[in-house]
Image (spheres, grey):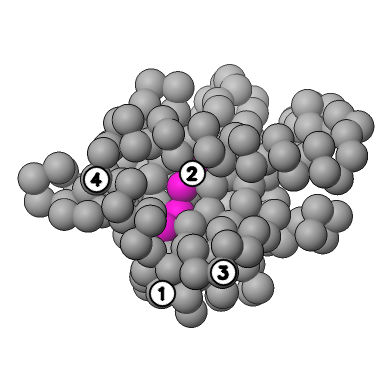
């Protein structure tokens, strides 16, 4: 049992070092904000191309948030991190944020995806931005179909008044998997 724990700790250390190296480029605060804002706009355009009704859902919502995530999984453990921005549609205020995740289960590889959250109410948006948010467990839910989903077609309800789209390199995901993800303000960019 001790050898298994030691092995898992070693793997997590390697994953942490890898993720830190990937994301530790030296850039000014303004450059980092610009890069995140550009990623968010590219992600939204990709979403709108894959799911045209998402444009109205995002524009008519209290706000939205877009995150880019890169994850690594080695054997039984994995993790990931990313950056994003939450936008209040009423005020235009941008809040730059971070996310971290932990995964369990057998696997090997690197994955990249984008999460786009849509907040139906200002209360849901403010809670997400000011208190942070956790997406726990191994939650997988099927996205609504274009014929039955209405304005949120292609999205999955992940909280009270919170919908999420997930885009991978293959396009809009039909299912959304959350594996112990936490979203919180990036104090260095706000």
Q: Position of residue 11 (x, y in %)?
A: 75, 31
How far apart are the two marked residues, 4 and 2, measured between alpha carbons? 17 Å
- Number of numbered discs: 4
Q: Is residue 163 visible?
A: no
Q: Which mark is nearer the camera, 2 or 3?
A: 3
Q: Between residues 15 and 152, which one lies in front from this camera angle?
A: 152
Q: Residue at x 38, y 45 (%)?
A: 165
Q: Work out whether mark 4 precedes mark 3 in sequence or the reverse, and give the earlier one.
A: 4
In this picture, residue 20 sits left or right of residue 116: right
Q: Residue at x 24, y 45 (%)?
A: 53
Q: Which residue is mark 2?
A: 115
Q: Which residue is mark 3?
A: 91
Asked if marks 1 and 4 touch (Cβ < 8 Å), the reply is no
Mark 1 residue element: loop
Q: Quadrant of the N terminus?
A: top right
Q: Between residues 59 and 6, which one lies in front from this camera angle?
A: 59
Q: Which residue is mark 1?
A: 121
Q: Position of residue 155 (x, y in %)?
A: 30, 49
Q: Which mark is nearer the camera, 1 or 3?
A: 3
Q: Which mark is nearer the camera, 4 or 3?
A: 3
Residue 76, compared with residue 60, is above or below; it is above
Asked if marks 4 and 3 touch (Cβ < 8 Å), the reply is no
Query: Mark 2 Cα within 10 Å, few/some/many (few <14, many 20+)?
Result: many
Q: Work out whether mark 1 precedes mark 4 in sequence or the reverse, and give the earlier one.
A: 4
Q: Main secondary structure of the magenta part?
A: strand
Q: Which residue is mark 4?
A: 53
Q: Which residues are magenta?
A: 114-118
Residue 66, compared with residue 51, is above or below; it is below
Mark 4 residue element: loop
Q: Position of residue 106 (x, y in %)?
A: 52, 29
In this picture, residue 42 sits left or right of residue 29: left
């Amino acid at each position: 049992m001790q050898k298994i724990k030691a092995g898992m700790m070693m793997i997590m250390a390697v994953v942490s070092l890898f993720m830190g190296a990937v994301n530790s480029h030296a850039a000014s605060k303004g450059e980092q904000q610009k890069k995140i804002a550009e990623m968010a706009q590219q992600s939204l355009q990709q979403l709108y191309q894959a799911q045209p009704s998402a444009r109205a859902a995002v524009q008519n919502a209290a706000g939205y948030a877009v995150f880019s995530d890169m994850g690594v999984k080695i054997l039984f453990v994995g993790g990931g991190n990313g950056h994003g921005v939450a936008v209040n549609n009423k005020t235009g205020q941008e809040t730059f944020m971070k996310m971290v995740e932990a995964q369990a289960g057998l696997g090997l590889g690197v994955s990249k995806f984008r999460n786009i959250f849509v907040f139906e109410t200002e209360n849901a948006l403010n809670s997400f931005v000011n208190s942070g948010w956790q997406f726990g467990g191994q939650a997988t839910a099927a996205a609504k179909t274009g014929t039955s989903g209405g304005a949120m077609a292609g999205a999955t309800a992940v909280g009270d008044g919170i919908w999420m789209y997930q885009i991978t390199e293959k396009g809009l995901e039909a299912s959304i998997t959350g594996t112990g993800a936490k979203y919180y303000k990036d104090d260095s960019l706000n």
